[in-house]
Amino acid sequence: MKKIIINTFVMGFVVVVNAQGWVALDNVSNTSTNPLATASGLFWLSTGGTPALINQDFNAAFYGGATSKSLSLIATFLLSDGTATHDNPFPGIFLDPTGNSYLIPGTVTSVFIQIQAWTGNFNSYAGALNGGAPAVQSPVFVNPLNNFLGPPADLTGMPAMVLAVPEPSTFALAGLGGVCALLLVLWRGRRNTNEKANP
C-alpha cells in the first residue's frame, strides 16, 4: 500500500512539473468583438479613429512571469525578419508562426502577461512609437493556465488591443506651445518696431 501511495505521489508530481506554466502565444480561442473588451480580446487597427479587426500580419513582443514584477521577454515576432509572417488566417487573431508553447517558471494556475504590438518594419515597440506607426501595449493581465492534463493555455485573459498611431506626448505639445509663444513674441516685437519706424 505504501508503494502505491508513493508511486501516485511521484506520478502526480511529474504531471504537475511537466504541465506547469505552459502558454501558447496566440489568441485563437478569443471571441469578444468589443474593442474595449477586458478579456477574450482580439487585435484591432484604428486608422482614422474607428477600430476594425486587424486583417494583416503585425509585429508582437510577449512578456510573461509568475508575478507582475517578474516579467521577462518570452518571444518577439518581427515582420522585418519574417518571424511575424503567418498569413493572418482570421481578422483580429495572432497566431505564433512557430507553433511553440512556452514555459513560464514558477506558475501553475495562472501567469502574468504583457503584450506589445505594432505595424511596420520597426524592430521594437519603442521604435514604432518613435516612428509614428500604429502600436499598442497591453496592461499586465493575468492569464489562466489549463488543467494539468490539458494543452498549453491560449491568451484568453488578453484584453482587446487597438493598434493606433500614438498621440503626441505632453512634452511635444508643450514644446510646440513654446515655439508658438516665441513666434508670437517675435512677431509682436517686429510689429512694434515697424510702428515706431513708421508713425
Image: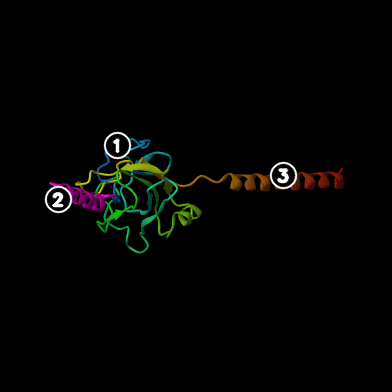
What count of labels does the image hold? 3
Q: Which mark identifies residue 2? A: none
Which comes before the other along the chain, label 1 or label 2?
A: 2
Residue under pointer 2: 3
What percent of the width, then of the height, locates residue 12?
20, 48
Residue 135 vs residue 87: left or right? right
Helix, strand or loop status at disc 3 = helix
Residue at figure coordinates x 23%, y 43% from the top left: 147
Residue under pointer 3: 184
Q: What stretch is highlighted in magenta?
A: 1-20
Helix, strand or loop status at disc 1 = loop
Confirm or deny contact between disc 3 and disc 1 (CB under 8 A): no
Q: Relative to 73, say whether 195 is above or below.
A: above
Residue 135 vs residue 167: left or right? left
**Amino acid type of the residue tagged 3 in the rendering:** Leu
| Label 1 to label 2: alpha-carbon separation | 49 Å
Q: Which mark identifies residue 32? A: 1
**Amino acid type of the residue tagged 1 in the rendering:** Ser
Viewer-nearest of discs 1 and 2: 2
Viewer-side residue, 37 vs 2: 2
What percent of the width, then of the height, locates residue 137?
43, 47
For label 2, the crowd category at 10 Å Cα-Cα, with few meaning under 14, some 14 to 19 and many 20 or more, is: few
Residue at figure coordinates x 29%, y 36% from the top left: 32
Which comes before the other along the chain, label 3 or label 1?
A: 1
Q: In which quarter of the image is residue 40?
A: top left
Confirm or deny contact between disc 3 and disc 2 (CB under 8 A): no
Viewer-nearest of discs 3 and 2: 2
Residue 110 shows in the view = yes
Q: Image quadrant for the C terminus?
A: top right
